[in-house]
Image (tube, rainbow, N blue to C red):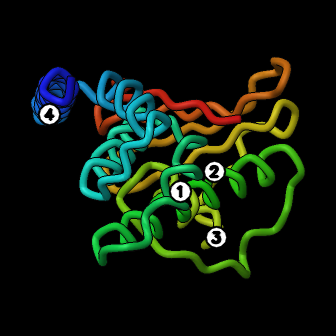
């Protein structure tokens, strides 16, 4: 009986290792949606390896799946890398919330200071705090930010709930990415 249980346990652990290896390969291929979705299932299933959770969180951040980062950042506290990732995730969550409030409620961001990253939310937040934007329209609200050779257009879509949309254009005016937050 013990032998059957040990064989079963070995089989399950082997499948788990292959599954994580598959997610690492997906991450290297920049298939962030698969890593985020499957990784969050593994996290909810009990995986607490901080290196793995950091990879999952970065993948989620890359596809603007910001809300799950709150759960991940709470679990990252044992290692230095885990704590760094937790701070990064918390920063993105906060910047997303402030962007939403800025666009919908008109709150003043000029007095705020938070860590800076290279994520699009940080780029937008930095420009909003420093008043480096042009109001293109008040109703519906639309802003334009020039950041290096990029032009970032931020606007509200009247859905339920409302969405804040972000379109990023390169120097030639070609749209290179689209993001949305609520």
Q: Are marks 4 and 3 in contact (CB under 8 Å)?
A: no
State how far apart marks 1 and 3 are (Cα).
15 Å
Secondary structure of residue under mark 2: helix
The part of the image, by quadrant, that contains residue 4 is top left
From the viewer's side, name the closer residue of 35 and 119. 35
Discs 1/4, front: 4
Q: Residue at x 86, y 55 (%)?
A: 106
Q: Position of residue 160 (x, y in %)?
A: 85, 19
Does 151 appear above or below 125? above
Of marks 4 and 3, which one's residue comes earlier in the chain? Answer: 4
Judge from the rendering whether residue 7 lies leftward or rightward of residue 32; answer left or right. left
Secondary structure of residue under mark 4: helix
Q: Which residue is mark 2?
A: 96
Q: Residue at x 72, y 76 (%)?
A: 110
State how far apart marks 2 and 1 are (Cα).
6 Å
Q: Which residue is mark 4?
A: 17
Residue placed furthest toward the front: 1
Q: Which residue is mark 3?
A: 129
State how far apart marks 2 and 3 are (Cα).
13 Å
Packing grade of label 1 (10 A; few <14, some 14-19, many >=20) is many
Does 127 appear above or below 134? below
Q: Are marks 2 and 1 in contact (CB under 8 Å)?
A: yes
Q: Residue at x 72, y 58 (%)?
A: 98
Q: Are marks 2 and 3 in contact (CB under 8 Å)?
A: no
Discs 4/3, front: 4
Does 19 appear above or below 49? above
State how far apart marks 2 and 4 are (Cα).
34 Å
Secondary structure of residue under mark 3: helix
Of marks 2 and 4, which one's residue comes earlier in the chain? Answer: 4
Q: Which residue is mark 1?
A: 92
The part of the image, by quadrant, that contains residue 113 is bottom right
Discs 2/3, front: 2
């Amino acid at each position: 009986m013990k032998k059957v249980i040990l064989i079963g346990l070995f089989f399950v652990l082997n499948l788990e290792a292959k599954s994580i290896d598959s997610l690492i390969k997906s991450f290297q291929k920049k298939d962030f949606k698969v890593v985020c979705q499957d990784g969050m299932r593994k996290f909810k299933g009990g995986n607490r390896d901080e290196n793995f959770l950091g990879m999952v969180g970065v993948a989620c951040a890359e596809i603007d799946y910001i809300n799950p980062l709150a759960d991940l950042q709470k679990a990252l506290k044992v290692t230095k890398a885990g704590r760094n990732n937790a701070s990064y995730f918390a920063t993105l969550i906060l910047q997303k919330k402030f962007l939403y409030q800025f666009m919908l409620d008109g709150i003043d961001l000029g007095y705020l200071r938070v860590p800076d990253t290279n994520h699009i939310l940080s780029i937008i937040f930095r420009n909003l705090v420093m008043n480096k934007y042009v109001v293109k329209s008040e109703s519906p609200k639309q802003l334009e930010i020039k950041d290096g050779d990029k032009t970032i257009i931020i606007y509200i879509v009247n859905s339920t709930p409302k969405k804040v949309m972000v379109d990023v254009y390169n120097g030639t005016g070609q749209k290179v990415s689209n993001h949305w937050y609520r």
